[in-house]
Image (tube, grey):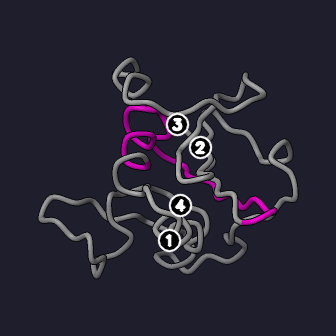
Amino acid sequence: MATRSFIAIKDGDKYRDIYCHNDGYLSYNGYILKNHYNTFERVNSLIELGDLSYLGQLLSKKDPHQSEDGSITFAYGRDRGETGTLAKEFDNESKLRTEEYNYLFKDGLWYWRTERETSFKLLTDEDIQNDL
């Protein structure tokens, strides 16, 4: 069974989000986002891929952050040729879509919430550890 999530970015006065089908929990997607996608440029490149089957530490095989043990992100559009998978855009944080886990990158930091919560909170190493 999949643990679904949305991954979003605040870009100026707009918000964009993508769906991620697998491993959305804090100790996996939360950990990878916080530790491998921690600049606006890197997160924006991830969002540009559109909806994901799987979030990896690397954007592609040619990722300049390549490491021998890095997993590669699997995107529906790029890797399976699916259509209709581009990021959705919103003009308000409250309009972002909601799944089991939800992540938002804004002002250089990651925030998270579950589907039962209405507001985002800062993603910390303690949150990730407590999820293990």
Q: Residues within 10 Å of mark 4 (few under 14, many from 20)?
A: many
The residue that appears at 61% across and 52% down in the rendered structure is 107
Name the residue that disc number 2 marks. 103
In the rendered structure, which disc, 1 or 2, sits on the residue that comes first in sequence? 1
In the rendered structure, which disc, 3 or 2, sits on the residue that comes first in sequence? 3
Name the residue type under label 2: Tyr
Assess whether residue 25 is covered by the magenta stretch: yes
In the rendered structure, which disc, 4 or 3, sits on the residue that comes first in sequence? 3
Tag nearer the camera, 3 or 1: 1
**Element carrying mark 3:** loop
Query: Left or right of 39: which side holds 64?
Result: left
Name the residue that disc number 4 marks. 52
Measure the alpha-carbon separation of dots 4 and 3: 12 Å
Query: Left or right of 132: which side holds 45?
Result: right
**Element carrying mark 2:** strand
The residue that appears at 40% across and 64% down in the rendered structure is 73
Tag nearer the camera, 3 or 2: 2
Nearest the viewer among 35 and 117 is 35
The residue that appears at 69% across and 57% down in the rendered structure is 10
In the rendered structure, which disc, 1 or 4, sits on the residue that comes first in sequence? 1
Give the image location of residue 20, x and y in percent: 56, 52
Measure the alpha-carbon separation of dots 3 and 1: 26 Å
**Element carrying mark 1:** helix
Name the residue that disc number 1 marks. 41
The single residue placed furthest to the front in the displayed view is 107
Give the image location of residue 66, x and y in percent: 22, 70
Residue 114 - label: none
Q: Quadrant of residue 60?
A: bottom left
Name the residue that disc number 3 marks. 3
Measure the alpha-carbon separation of dots 2 and 4: 14 Å
Q: Residues within 10 Å of mark 3 (few under 14, many from 20)?
A: some
Assess whether residue 16 is covered by the magenta stretch: yes
